[in-house]
Amino acid sequence: MNNLISYLIPLSLTLLIETPLAAVLERNKKFILSVILVNIITNPAANAIARTWPQTFFATSWAIPTMEIIIVLIEWGMLAFLYRKKYLFLFFFSLLVNGLSYLTGLLIFN
């Protein structure tokens, strides 16, 4: 149960940040649901990777930024597939909300 909570806390934080931004920036139900679905897939996966990769990799200064860039690109691709329009907007949306989620997590958990 404790392990499940350790995945639900970051996912909840991400959804609390990204979903309202999606609603404000693109008032479309399909877009908002796409953002939620994408985060339900990518956030636990990213946390699983961060918890299972060798500590030597995550001890480097470039590991987390690299993983965040990969997540931005994956989420952009998933949103583009699900939403099928405004591709440049989707890239900057993914970059913005993932940056805000990451920085909020740093402020809260560090």
Image: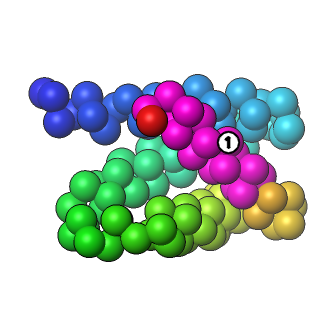
Give the main secondary structure, helix, strand or loop, of the magenta stretch.
helix
The magenta stretch spans residue 102: yes
In the figure, residue 29 lies in which quadrant? Answer: top right
Residue at image x 31%, y 38%?
Answer: 7
Please, what is the three-letter code of the amino acid marked with disc 1? Leu
Q: Where residue 36 sits: x, y (%)?
A: 56, 40
Identify the element where label 1 is drawn: helix
Outermost residue on the left side: it is 1
The magenta stretch spans residue 86: no
Residue 14 visible in the current orientation: no
Residue 49: quadrant of the picture: bottom left
Q: Quadrant of the N terminus?
A: top left
Q: Where does residue 53 sit, x and y in percent of width and height?
A: 24, 67
> What residue range appears in magenta?
93-109
For residue 33, which quarter of the picture? top right
What residue is at 39 percent from the left and 57 percent from the top?
A: 46
* Circle 1 residue: 100
Q: Residue at x 53, y 51 (%)?
A: 38
Q: Position of residue 6 (x, y in %)?
A: 27, 34
Q: Is residue 57 left or right of residue 90?
A: left
Q: Residues within 10 Å of mark 1 (few under 14, many from 20)?
A: some
**Nearest the eye: 2 or 89:** 2
